[in-house]
Image (tube, grey):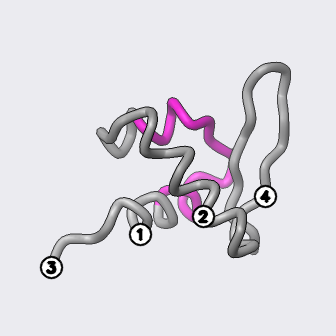
């Protein structure tokens, strides 16, 4: 059974500890740039990620 986009996003954030932007996540998972913020908002609401603004971009990190 294949993983959901949310599960793939979680795996990517856990693996990449330097933080990722929405565009980087979309490119690595080969999903729409519009899909990623929906997944990240869900994870943020669950308290599983943290977000750090850097200029115009936001870096997303998995909370340990």
Q: Which residue is mark 3?
A: 1
Q: Nearer the viewer, mark 2 or mark 3?
A: 2
Secondary element type, mark 2: helix
Secondary element type, mark 4: strand
Seen as rendered, the residue at the extreme left is 1
In whole angstroms, how far apart are the C-alphas of marks 4 and 3?
Answer: 29 Å
Of the numbered discs 2 and 1, the one sitting upstream in the chain is: 1
In whole angstroms, how far apart are the C-alphas of marks 4 and 2?
Answer: 12 Å
Is residue 49 depicted above or below 2 in this figure?
above
Of the numbered discs 2 and 3, the one sitting upstream in the chain is: 3
In whole angstroms, how far apart are the C-alphas of marks 2 and 3?
Answer: 22 Å
**What residue is rendered at 32% in x and 41% in y?**
31
Residue 3 is a magenta residue = no
Seen as rendered, the residue at the extreme bottom is 1
Of the numbered discs 3 and 1, the one sitting upstream in the chain is: 3
Q: Nearer the viewer, residue 22 or 15?
A: 22
| Residue span colored magenta | 12-26
Q: Which residue is mark 4?
A: 50
Q: Quadrant of the C terminus?
A: bottom right
Residue 28 placement, left or right of 21: left
Predominant secondary structure in magenta? Answer: helix
Residue 29 at x, y = what percent? 35, 45
Q: Which residue is mark 2?
A: 42
Secondary element type, mark 3: loop
């Amino acid at each position: 059974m294949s993983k959901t986009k949310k599960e793939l996003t979680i795996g990517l954030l856990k693996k990449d500890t330097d933080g990722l932007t929405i565009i980087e996540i979309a490119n690595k998972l080969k999903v729409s740039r519009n899909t990623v913020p929906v997944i990240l908002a869900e994870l943020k609401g669950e308290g599983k990620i943290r977000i750090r603004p850097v200029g115009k971009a936001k870096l997303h990190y998995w909370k340990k």
